[in-house]
Image (cartoon, rainbow, N blue to C red):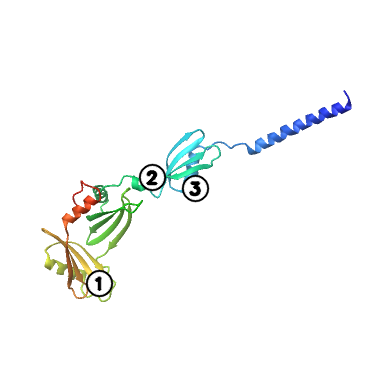
């Protein structure tokens, strides 16, 4: 064997050794990390997007997960090996979910001791259907905006009977009550003060023996501006419009 042959063999062996070393280095640096666990994937999603993961499944090293945020449901896919999010989609709109009936909303609110429900009106606001509920409680009128799908109270507006800011008010809420009672004997359901450019007015609702009327009384002069009688038949029609055929009254 000549020196040239020995030199060539040594060179080939050296090149093979260098190649093996380089391949080992590359595999060591860029090898895939350990796969995500379900708990790790759940924590990753809730940290990134908020909300809460409701369900998950794993197939072919991919997590299929669903999470809810702000009453909306989203579905996503995560690569279990890399942790990369492969897809994220919003599911069906709230319009395709079950809307609670008026009776269900009434039962839910009554269980929360929110006062006496006077009326429930359905509003279909695109993807956020709502109920507007008027409630009387200790001579206060409350207007509740309720999520028609979850039954959660979105907002609450309270009109206090003594919420008077106009210094020109002469008569008190008690005097307004007596004026209304002089016209209709019954139980005062609520008294609310409303501001206006001409001195404000009181709304006094009285539940009589056979009728229920709301008196609008001028807060300065005490004059009865209007009298509105509750029409139960009209309330029944509103119930039918909401799609709740079994709810015959508000």
* Residue 250 appears in the figure: no
- Frontmost of labels 1 and 2 is 2
Residue with the mark numbered 1: 200
Image location (x, y in percent) of residue 97: 34, 45
Report the residue at 72% width, 32% height from top: 20
SS category of the residue bearing label 3: helix
In the rendered image, which quarter is residue 133 located in?
A: bottom left
Q: Between disc 3 and disc 2, whose residue precedes? A: 3
Report the residue at 56% width, 39% height from top: 82
Circle count: 3
Q: Is residue 12 left or right of residue 161?
A: right
Report the residue at 69% width, 34% height from top: 23
- Frontmost of labels 3 and 2 is 2
Q: Between disc 1 and disc 2, whose residue precedes? A: 2
SS category of the residue bearing label 1: loop
Image location (x, y in percent) of residue 210: 11, 58
Residue with the mark numbered 2: 92
Q: Is residue 129 left or right of residue 140?
A: right
In the rendered image, which quarter is residue 181 located in?
A: bottom left
Find residue 48 and name its label: 3
């Amino acid at each position: 064997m000549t020196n040239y042959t020995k030199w060539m063999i040594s060179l080939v062996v050296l090149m093979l050794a260098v190649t093996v070393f380089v391949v080992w280095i590359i595999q060591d640096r860029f090898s895939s990390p350990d796969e995500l666990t379900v708990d790790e994937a759940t924590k990753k999603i809730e940290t990134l997007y908020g909300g809460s993961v409701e369900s998950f499944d794993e197939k072919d090293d991919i997590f299929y997960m669903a999470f809810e945020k702000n009453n909306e449901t989203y579905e996503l896919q995560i690569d279990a090996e890399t942790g990369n999010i492969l897809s994220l989609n919003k599911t069906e709109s709230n319009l395709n979910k079950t809307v609670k009936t008026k009776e269900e909303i009434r039962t839910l609110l009554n269980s929360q001791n929110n006062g006496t429900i006077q009326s429930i009106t359905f509003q279909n606001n695109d993807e956020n259907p709502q109920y507007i509920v008027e409630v009387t409680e200790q001579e206060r009128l409350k207007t509740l905006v309720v999520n028609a799908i979850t039954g959660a109270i979105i907002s609450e507006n309270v009109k206090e009977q003594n919420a008077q800011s106009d210094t020109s008010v002469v008569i008190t809420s008690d005097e307004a009550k007596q004026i209304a009672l002089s016209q209709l004997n019954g139980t005062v359901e609520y008294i609310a003060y409303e501001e206006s450019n001409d001195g404000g007015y009181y709304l006094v609702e009285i539940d009589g023996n056979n009728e229920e009327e709301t008196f609008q009384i001028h807060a300065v002069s005490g004059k009865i501006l209007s009298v509105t009688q509750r029409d139960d038949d009209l309330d029944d029609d509103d119930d039918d419009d909401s799609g709740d055929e079994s709810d015959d009254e508000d």
